[in-house]
Each structure stands twice: as C-alpha cells, then as structure tokens.
Image (cartoon, rainbow, N blue to C red):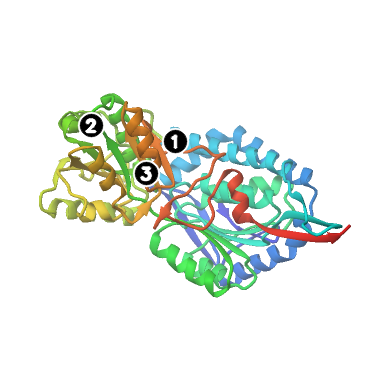
Amino acid sequence: MDTFSNLIGGEWTEGPGITENINPSNTDDVIGRYAQGDAAQANAAIAAAKAAAPSWARTNVMVRHNILKAAAAEIFARAKELGDLLAREEGKTLAEGIGEAGRAGQIFDFFAGECLRLAGEKVPSIRPGVEIEITREPMGVVGMITPWNFPIAIPAWKIAPALCYGNTIVIKPAELVPGCAWALADILKRAGLPDGVLNLVMGKGSVVGEAILSSPDVDAVTFTGSVATGKHVAMKCAEHMRKVQLEMGGKNPLVILDDADLDIAVDCAVNGAFFSTGQRCTASSRLIVTEGIHDRFVEATIAKLQSLSVDDARKDGTHIGPVVDAKQLDTDMNYIEIGRGEDGARLAWGGERLNRATPGFYLQPALFTETSNDMRINREEIFGPVATVLRVKDYDEALAVANDTRFGLSSGICTTSLKYASHFKRNAEAGMVMVNLPTAGVDPHVPFGGRKGSSYGPREQGRYAAEFYTTVKTAYQLA
C-alpha cells in the first residue's frame, strides 16, 4: 500500500504518525496511508514558507503564470483520475468528482491569467510636484485550513490566488480527505514551484491547525469549515492582529412560488438539497413553498426521490453516494430523530440506513414536511441529505421566513414572475442569490461568500480574491 508524506521546504517528509484513508462507499477499501504531522512539522513548514516568501513575492509574473498554467493543464488532463480519487475518498459520485476536478483546473487557469493582469493605480496628488502610486503586495505566509466536502476545489481556490499574488503557503487539509490535497501539492511541485512556496502538512486540526493559528510568522489565515471552529480561528487570529477569511455554514432557503414551473422547482430542490449527499454549505436545506403549489410540489419531489439511486459513489447509475464517515452519519441520523420528535413535523420520505453490496455509510434522503421555522431541523445546519418543507401563505411570508436565519450564504427562488424574482434578488439576505437554479452550484471566476454567520472577511474566488491575498500600499514621491 502506498504511503504519502508531507511536503515541507520542497522535501517529502514522513510524519510522526500515519492514518489510513478509507473509502466511505466501501470501508474495506483503504486508499492509502497518509502522514500525520505534528506541531514541530507545522512550525518547520511555516519557517520554510517564511524563508521562501521574499523571493517568491518578487518572482517574475510570467514565471508564476507558467507554473499555474502547467498545473491547470495537468489537472485537466487527469480530471477522470482525480475525480475517481475524490469519489473514492469523499463519497461524491464519480460524475460530481470529475466535475469538481475540472473546476479546480478552471481555477488554476483563471489565476494563471490573473498573474499577467496585476495592476495598480497612478493618481494625481493635491500637492503640486507629488506623484502617488497605489499598488497591491502579497500578505506573506498564508495558512490554509480546508474542509472535507470539496477536497480538491476548495484547496484550489485558496492555493491558486495565493500563489498568483505572490504569497507562500502552509496548508492543512481535512483529515478525512488527504488524497486530493496531496495530489495538488505533487502537481504544483512538478510544475516548477520553488521549494518552500507551498508546504503541505496533513494531520489533526487540534495539532497542525492549532500550530498554524498560534504562529506569529503566519500573516493571514483562510479557513472553511464549521461555525464553531471558525469562531475559534477568528479569535486566534485576533490575538496576532492578522488578516482572516472564514467560510462557514449555511441553512439555505429555496422559495417556490405558486407560479413556478413545477419541474424546474423540483429539479432545483432535489439537486440543491440532496446531490453531493447534501454535504454542501450551499445546500437547499429549507424548501419554502406557497400554499397553492405546496401539495403538488411535495408529491412530485417524493416521486423524484423515489427514482434516485443511493449506492457506491463510483458505480454507474448512482445519483447519491454515501455520507462521508460514521461520525457524520450519526449526526444525520440524530437530526432525523430530532425531526421525528418535533411537534407537527412529518417525515414524508426516507431517512433510513441502507445496506448495499459493500459496507458503507449509506443513508436514504430524508424529506420532512409540515415544519415550522422555529424547529431545530430548520435552525441548525445538518450537513447531510436532509431537507424540510415549510408551508407559507404568499411571497411576503416566504421572504420573511427565508431571511429568518442566522446564516446568509445562498438563497434561491423558483418563479416565473419578473417582479418577484427582481424583488427577491434585492432583498434576500444572502451573499449569493439563485433564480430558477439550485442554491448549490457557483462559477469559479466570480466572488463566493455570504453574510451573517456564514462568512467573515473578504470574499473568495475571482478578482475579489485580491482583497484577502494582498495588502494595499500607497506610495508618495516628489517628482
């Protein structure tokens, strides 16, 4: 069985520990043995990144462009292989895994181009004979802590802009999915990235992640994960007065109005709520449906769910793969029991453990109806294939319920009314709004992020990434 090491200062380095990467579709299948780093290795990686930072910050932009372009080309060429690895270690269907690998390639390709579009400003001073230049400079050493649900796309959309704008990196991927992050590090090393510019330290968040947060030599931290951990990251960064970027949870609403196209509404709901096993921060976990279409929508949604196959992520014909691991499955099952016990809620479909040909964490999608917005299953992020239906009177009530949440990542509406679509886009309290589209599914070249408890700090992706990965300098000079 292959063993995969950490990358520190350009050298593949064994860790003091080893963990096995398990396939959630088949727990008898061990993908590989991956290093478990400790605080000493994390600090060595930070030192390597700090040492490499000055020269990388001044590297010719064409050199950066060529490295990111080469990485993009290899990701595109290996999309099926990388997608298969992703499906095998995370449980996303093979089609979704290949699509996510392709998205990682698109992100590197975009930021390869951005290397050649770096620009500043030259503006007149109010004082005669004085020139002013406004430029962006890299932050320095960026610590990255990434989640398990998008194991190649999220590392890509953090790594690519960081390198583009001249930063060095220490990245700690989620323990459940080290394979995709290791593959990205390997691709970038072979693409010609100088030693120490990208350092990969796999291991526990409480050990490796905490070392990154505690180091005074880390200039910025970008984190994607739970709200509770995000708050801890923010507080640790405040101690060091460092820039921080947090992407956390969601309890995203999808409003379905009486005038909606029923087929489109059902497709949006099922895709957004249940594909990727519901393990997306942008998932449509609250389906807010007006009275006139409610019963038809519920009936059609259940019929759609009955037609879906829950099975091995890499098997032909699978629509929904397994939950990522036993702990997440227990969480999902616990919330299903909470929903069963909430006064008025009805489990209209699913919610049962499933057995398949191989031992895995299979769960039938669960749909609750007749719920109210004060129920726990409508207030707390479940992060699994569980969705609720909330019956409302009209658009005004639907909008109020949609915004009645501590989260604000993504929000959607299904309607054929230009009036309601336009009003919803302006008034939905979310960072991203979808009209007649699933709440999950975004483009790589535009900003990603939310409001309220979902996000903190500058946006990710697209040109808005410069707000986090650079600092602004204003220089005055006597002409």
Q: Secondary structure at mark 3?
A: helix
In the rendered structure, the answer to whether residue 400 lies left or right of residue 192 reads left
Q: Which mark is residue 96?
A: 1
Give the mark nearer the N terminus: 2 vs 1: 1
Q: Secondary structure at mark 2?
A: helix
Would residue 110 be seen by someone viewing this image from the given angle?
A: yes
Q: Which mark is residue 427?
A: 3
The residue lying toward the viewer, choosing from 4 and 351, is 351
Quote the CA–CA distance across marks 1 and 3: 32 Å
Residue contact between numbered discs 2 and 3, judged by CB atoms under 8 Å:
no
Quote the CA–CA distance across marks 2 and 1: 21 Å
* Amino acid marked by disc 3: Asn
Q: Residue at x 65, y 45 (%)?
A: 187
Give the mark nearer the N terminus: 1 vs 3: 1
* Amino acid marked by disc 1: Glu
In this figure, which residue is indicated by the disc labeled 2? 301
In the rendered structure, the answer to whether residue 320 lies left or right of residue 300 reads right
In the rendered structure, the answer to whether residue 430 lies left or right of residue 78 reads left
